[in-house]
Amino acid sequence: MKLIIDNLHLERGGKFLFKDLSFCLESYKPIIVMGSNGSGKTSLLRCISGLLHSTSGEIYSINEKGEKIEYLHQCNYSGHKLAIKNELTVQENIIFWSRYYKKEINKDLLIKFKLDSLSDISVGLLSFGQMKKLSLIRIFLAEKSIWLLDEPMVGLDRESQEVVKKLIEKHIDLGKLIIITTHTDLKFDNQILLSL
Amino acid sequence: MGTYLAIIKRDLVISYKDGDHIAMGFGFFLVIISLLPIGIGSDIDILPKVGPVLLWIAFLLTTLFTISRLFKDDHVDGTMDFMIMDSAIFEIIIICKVFAYWISITLPLIIVIPIMSILLNISMDLILPITFIIFISSPAFVFIAAVGSALTLGMERSGILITILILPLYIPLIIVGISATNINVIGINSYSVSVMLISGFSMLSIALAPFLISLILRTNSY
């Protein structure tokens, strides 16, 4: 499967965030998007995820036979909003996603993220880093084919960053697609750097 | 099915943990109902005549007052984003969310309507018909209000705007509903016709509102 971004324009508030943006997202070739604040990194991911409508241009997916296929249901997006419920406990949030995606949670991941001992704690009491890890668990749990990660390392300690990096590498090794926006020095094999 | 049950269960757990919303709705309903008899004073004959109308208006205002948060929390915390991306099931997700709201806010109001009817000195013969007709009209009430909630998403203090936008849509429902339980016009025919009309209105709302809400939320997802 390939994801084609074809001649994408995005105008917000009378200003073009990007013009004539074209690239192809392929298996084993992660795309790292870099750029200054306000350059349109998040907006690009939101356009691809269908949450934001581009001014013009097209985003589509093709299968091995070259036929256009629907891709949105195969996408998972992690943005600045963490998509976790402060009123619920860590465990209740995870159980909800587990039921929502009909997938079993990998308990090793909770241990690696040091969230296993916090399962009965209300999310509102967690630190930002812990919330971010909890939010990322949703992405890893859903096991979708296209990951759109908006600054996934923000707020994470080094140990957790390593865990996230390994999970991203595993995703890439499975031939699945990924775009990551970042300000940190993230490196993956065969990565394509996109500057906005 | 597991996905939908998960959404309903999650919304119910959040509603009961964050109980102020339920308490506010319930309190608002009780305040409206209990203030009128004080306002009318000692003329006890007026109360049974205006009581059914008051129940309808209190029910309507409570729905409009409490519905503004239906999609707001999911929109603010980003949950709405991944739900919108599951495009094939988003309309069903909306139905699940409205159903969870109905269970947590609307159903308790319907349960106390018989008690409120006694407080309003409504005839015993009318209590069950009034409760039943409000019960079958409640899906229409909630789904129409949910459209208003989606339209005003992202606005602070959207409750009043929802009321202004949505209130005209309730007029046919209120006219039919009140005429069905009006002591002067009640009879087998008028009541059964009203039940059929309101059932149709409710079913139409359940069928159309999720698509309209889905369209509004997708357009406004920015």
Image: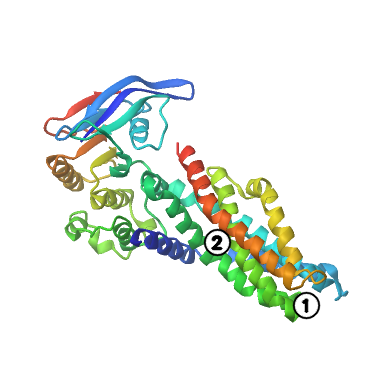
Check disc 1 and report the residue beneath it. Answer: B121
Check disc 2 and report the residue beneath it. Answer: B21
Q: Residue most toward the right? A: B43
Quarter of the rendering containing residue B184: bottom right
Depth check: A53 or B203 in front? B203
Q: Earlier in the sequence, mark 2 or mark 1?
A: 2
Residue type beneath disc 1: Asn
Q: Up-down: is B131 above or below A152?
A: below
Residue ID at (76%, 64%)? B179
Q: Residues within 10 Å of mark 1 (few under 14, many from 20)?
A: some
Quarter of the rendering containing residue A9: top left
Q: Residue most toward the bottom? A: B124
Depth check: B184 or B93 in front? B184
- The reply to whether residue B184 is visible in this rendering is yes
Instruction: Give residue B199's position: percent from left, percent from top.
Output: 61, 62
Q: Up-down: is B74 above or below A48?
A: below
Quarter of the rendering containing residue B122: bottom right
Instruction: Give residue B34's position: percent from left, percent from top.
Output: 73, 70
At mark 2, the secondary structure is helix
Give the distance between the C-alpha atoms of the residues marked 2 and 1, in whole angstroms.
Answer: 29 Å
Residue type beneath disc 2: His
